[in-house]
């Protein structure tokens, strides 16, 4: 594990492909230090976007321990707060679909979906992440607010109808 982490860090000036290769090697290990390391990589704004997106996807799709879910959700929310990288933000919004049971995540997704100042890509990704959360009280409330939205209103109405709330 330590050797692979050092190999990743040593590649700071190497290509994105080299870094991704090192991450793939690390991800094969079953070690409790992997997720904290990945969170560190995700938070590092000096890492290439492609590397950070790979980490986001790994954290979204990986097998996390229950005690890791809160810290992963918090790290993804931090990435989302950086408005300078749209691709990374989109992946963060999609990743949050896996963490809607964590306090604050559904509210954040709702705020993004309702924010007409956001790009349609971010808004729609937030909407689909809410859809994956299912018909919770909080999701239904956001969808009802979206009913009057020019972009997402029809989608919200359709989803509420499917969930038998309209």
Image: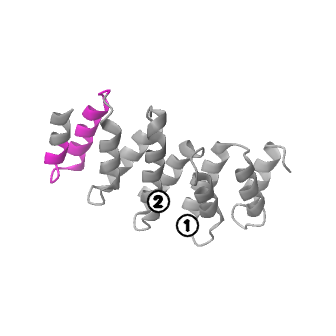
Report the side of 162 relative to 77 (left or right).
right
Q: Quadrant of the N terminus?
A: top left
Left or right of 137 on screen, residue 18? left
- Relative horizontal placement of residue 37, taking residue 88 as reference (left or right): left
Label 2 sits on a secondary structure element that is: helix
The magenta segment is 8-30
Residue at horizontal 59 percent and vertical 46 percent from the top: 100
Q: Which numbered circle lies on residue 80?
A: 2
Q: Does the magenta stretch include residue 155?
A: no
User: Residue 131, percent across and down?
Assistant: 67, 47
- Tell me the chief SS of the magenta region: helix
Q: Tell whether position 24 is magenta.
A: yes
Q: In this figure, what is the number of numbered marks?
A: 2
Residue hosting label 1: 119
Q: Residue at x 45, y 32 (%)?
A: 65
Residue that appears at 56% across and 68% down: 118
Whether residue 93 is visible, yes or no, is yes
Q: Nearer the viewer, mark 1 or mark 2?
A: 2
From where the camera sits, is residue 51 visible?
no
Q: Measured along the vertical axis of the image, is residue 74 above or below residue 59?
A: below
Percent across and percent down for residue 104 are 58, 55
Q: In this view, does 42 lie to the left or right of 158?
A: left
| Marks 1/2: CA–CA distance | 13 Å
Q: Which residue is drawn at 73% across and 62% down?
A: 146
């Amino acid at each position: 594990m330590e050797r692979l982490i050092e190999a990743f860090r040593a590649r700071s000036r190497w290509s994105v492909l080299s870094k991704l290769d090192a991450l793939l090697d690390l991800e094969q290990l079953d070690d409790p230090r992997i997720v904290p390391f990945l969170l560190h990589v995700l938070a590092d704004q000096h890492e290439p976007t492609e590397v950070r997106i790979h980490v986001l996807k790994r954290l979204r799709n990986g097998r996390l321990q229950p005690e890791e879910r809160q810290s992963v959700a918090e790290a993804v929310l931090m990435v989302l707060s950086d408005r300078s990288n749209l691709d990374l933000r989109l992946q963060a919004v999609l990743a949050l679909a896996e963490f809607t049971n964590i306090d604050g995540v559904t509210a954040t997704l709702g705020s993004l979906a309702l924010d007409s100042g956001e790009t349609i890509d971010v808004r729609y990704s937030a909407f689909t992440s809410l859809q994956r959360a299912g018909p919770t009280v909080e999701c239904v409330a956001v969808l009802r607010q979206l009913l009057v939205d020019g972009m997402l209103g029809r989608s919200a109405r359709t989803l509420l109808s499917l969930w038998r709330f309209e």
